Image (cartoon, rainbow, N blue to C red):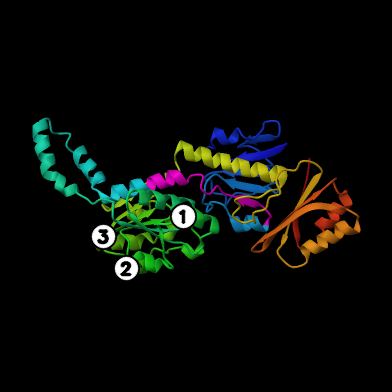
């Protein structure tokens, strides 16, 4: 029976996909085969040696020590796209809030509780409404940095609102490119994008190349009166530089899902408590995807949507036996492993070899389970770091 340790509240719609006859699931599992979580920070958590995989029900994995787990041969999964619609809708809300005096008008009306004469209130509102005027989104230009699952959905929605859309993504995949509406103008650099936009929406992961990408230098390139939507990660924006731009009138509004102390109370900041993916639908979608990926890996050795291992799938195991092994991505390892099987008259009926950076992952199918001595010989091949046997 597979053991799954959970952190945080995971949607029952996802957890119900673990068959009770094959899985034990709970927060108190002592020696788990896999870990399923949402926002729990694992950097200071001791990882049991039994863990083979970690799945985060969400896109970002900054709460998981990915590099450390990679060295231990632990596959880390995320769920890209599962919460994309929820984030897209909040980005649209952010743009609408930043384009009109909606929040300010609400606060003004909320302070009129002392008034009892509706006629007097109506006159006051008519006189004051000019203070909350704004502009329409139609005809404005939205710049999107990061054109993956969320970015492409934001682009499509903005086009439907008659906005002009331009985007920049230095790592745009072929799959993402096919998803992207043809009306989106592609820019070759962040600098080229910033100078012509009225709104900026950020959808890149918090990694070293994106850290502090929206800083004083980048802000100086933007048109006066632009607004920024940051529903990606706080690390990609230098908050102090944003405050300086707001104070100088260079930037009109900053809407974010990641409040920082210097932003609190600023009249031109709308800061939300990290609710981008906080919808019932998004939590269900993320949980279902995470559970499906864990099951596919634990039961069949297949990998999809891993942030540290290559994608590799040979479908379900319908009979016989499957061996998977991970190795350092150096020349000759697969050949040495296959030599072990050849020398012991073990026939490989199907196989797959994939690599990603310093990690190589292999799936091999057999008619029958290789002997323990053969398995140990493979395990002893130089640069092989982990090995599993899965039999039908």
Quadrant showing the N terminus: top right
Q: Can you tell which quarter of the image residue 141 is in?
A: bottom left
Residue 2 percent across, percent down from the top left: 70, 39
Secondary structure of the residue carrying tag 2 is helix
Find out whether residue 83 is within the magenta segment.
yes
Measure the C-alpha gap from mark 1 to mark 2.
28 Å
Q: What residue appears at the point 50 percent right and 39 percent down from the top-left corner?
A: 283
N-terminal of the pair, mark 3 or mark 2, is 2
- In depth, the one of 150 and 165 nearer the eye is 165
Measured along the vertical axis of the image, is residue 359 above or below residue 363? below
Q: Which mark is residue 220?
A: 2
Q: Which mark is residue 180?
A: 1
Measure the C-alpha gap from mark 1 to mark 3.
27 Å
Residue 101 percent across, percent down from the top left: 23, 47
Residue span colored magenta: 72-91
Measure the C-alpha gap from mark 3 to mark 2.
12 Å
Q: What residue appears at the point 48 percent right and 40 percent down from the top-left corner?
A: 282
Residue 32 percent across, percent down from the top left: 68, 42
Tell me if mark 1 has few (under 14), some (14-19) or many (20+) residues whose alpha carbon lies within 10 angstroms of its own: some
Q: Is residue 7 visible?
A: no
N-terminal of the pair, mark 1 or mark 2, is 1
Q: Relative to 85, is 226 on the left or the right?
A: left
For disc 3, the marked residue is 225
N-terminal of the pair, mark 1 or mark 3, is 1
Tell me if mark 2 has few (under 14), some (14-19) or many (20+) residues whose alpha carbon lies within 10 angstroms of its own: some
- In depth, the one of 68 and 155 nearer the eye is 155
């Amino acid at each position: 029976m597979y053991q799954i340790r959970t952190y945080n509240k995971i949607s029952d719609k996802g957890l119900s996909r673990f068959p009770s006859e094959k899985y034990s699931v709970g927060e108190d599992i002592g020696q788990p085969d896999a870990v399923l979580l949402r926002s729990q920070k694992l950097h200071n958590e001791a990882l049991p040696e039994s863990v083979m995989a970690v799945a985060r029900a969400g896109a970002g994995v900054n709460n998981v020590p990915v590099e450390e787990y990679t060295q231990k041969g632990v596959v880390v999964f995320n769920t890209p796209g599962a919460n994309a619609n929820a984030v897209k809708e909040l980005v649209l809300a952010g743009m609408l809030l930043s384009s009109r005096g909606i929040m300010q008008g609400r606060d003004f009306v909320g302070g009129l509780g002392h008034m009892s004469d509706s006629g007097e209130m109506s006159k006051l509102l008519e006189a004051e409404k000019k203070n909350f005027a704004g502009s329409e989104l139609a005809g404005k230009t939205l710049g999107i940095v990061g054109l993956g699952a969320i970015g492409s959905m934001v682009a499509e929605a903005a086009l439907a609102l008659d906005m002009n859309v331009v985007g920049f993504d230095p790592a745009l995949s072929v799959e993402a490119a096919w998803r992207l509406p043809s009306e989106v103008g592609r820019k070759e650099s962040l600098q080229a994008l910033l100078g012509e936009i009225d709104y900026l929406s950020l959808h890149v992961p918090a990694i070293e190349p994106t850290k502090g990408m929206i800083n004083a230098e980048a802000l100086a390139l933007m048109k006066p009166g632009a607004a920024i939507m940051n529903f990606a990660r706080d690390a990609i924006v230098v908050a102090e530089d944003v405050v300086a731009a707001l104070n100088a009138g260079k930037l009109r509004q900053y809407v974010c899902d990641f409040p920082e102390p210097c932003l609190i109370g600023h009249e031109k900041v709308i800061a939300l408590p990290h609710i981008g993916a906080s919808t019932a639908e998004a939590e269900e979608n993320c949980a279902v995807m995470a559970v499906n990926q864990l099951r596919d890996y634990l039961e069949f050795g297949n990998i999809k949507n891993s942030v540290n291992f290559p994608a590799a799938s040979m479908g379900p195991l319908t009979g016989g036996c499957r061996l998977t092994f991970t190795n350092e991505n150096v020349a000759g390892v697969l050949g040495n492993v296959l030599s072990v099987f050849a020398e012991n008259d073990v026939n490989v009926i199907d196989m797959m070899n994939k690599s990603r950076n310093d990690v190589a992952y292999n799936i091999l199918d057999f008619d029958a389970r290789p002997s323990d001595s053969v398995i140990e010989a493979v395990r002893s091949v130089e640069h092989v770091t982990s090995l599993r046997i899965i039999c039908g």
